[in-house]
Amino acid sequence: MSEPKRGRLVRDLPDGTVRQEAGTVEESAVRLDPDDAAEMVEALNAVHAGAFNLFYLVRKHYWSAEGAESGAVAEFYGEAYRRLREIDDAVARRVTELGGVPVSTPPEIQEYAPVHLEAEHLYSLRASLEGDLAAYATLAAGVRDAVDVADAIGEEASRELLEDRLETIEDDAHTIERFVEDDTLVEGER
C-alpha cells in the first residue's frame, strides 16, 4: 500500500536490525510463485486487518453491553472476540508463512481494513449489534474475496484456512442477527 508511517505511535527501534521491510514478500518454504505470493499476502492482510478491527469492536461491546438482554449478549461477545482473535492470529501467521509481513501498526491496519472502527462513544446495545452485524458482513465479503484469490492462484492452504474461518464468522453473524431480531432489546438506563 503506502510508505510506512512514523510518529508518536509508530517508531523504529533505535538499535534494531530490520529482518524484512514491511510491504515486501520474500521467498518462503511454501515456494509459491513470487507474484502469486504477493497477491495472496495482500488479500490476507486485508482479512487480517478487518478481523483485527472487528475484534476491537466486539471487545468494546463486550465491556459496555447493558440493558435487559445484556447478559446473554455480553456472554456471546466474550466468546466472539476470542474467536476473532484466533482468526486474526491464524491469518497473520499465514502471511508470514507465505513470506510476507502482516500489517501491524494502527495506520497500516486502518489503511487495509475493510471493517471500520466506530467512534469512541458508547452506543445503545441495539445500535452496537446492528453495527457489528454490518461489520461481520463486510469481513465475510473480504474473506470470500481472499478465497477467490487463493482459488485463482491455486493456493489450497490459504483457501482452506479462510473457508474454515469464514464459517465461524458467518455463525457469529447469524447469532448477532438473532439478537437484533429480538424485540426485547431495550436500552439500559444511564
Image (tube, rainbow, N blue to C red):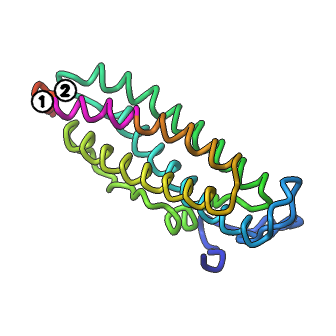
Q: What residue type is disc 1 on?
A: Val
Disc ID at residue 8:
none
Q: Residue furthest bottom?
A: 3
Foreground residue, 177 or 125?
177
Q: Nearer the viewer, residue 134 or 11?
A: 134
- Residue 54 against residue 190 in the figure, above or below: below
Binning the other alpha carbons within 10 Å of mark 2 as few (below 14), some (14 to 19) or many (20 upward) gives some
- Horizontally, residue 188 falls left or right of residue 102, namely left
User: Contact (CB < 8 A) between labels 1 and 2?
Assistant: yes
Which residue is more in the foreground, 10 or 91? 91
Does the magenta run of residues contain 77? no
Secondary structure under badge 2? loop
- CA–CA distance in space, label 1 to label 2: 6 Å
Expressed as whole percent of the image width and height from the top left, the position of residue 71 reads 29, 19
Task: Name the residue: 39% across, 58% down.
Answer: 116
Specify start and end residues of the magenta stretch as a single range: 171-181
Q: Which mark is residue 186?
A: 1
Horizontal and vertical percent position of residue 1: 60, 76
Residue in the image at 57% along x and 37% along y: 164
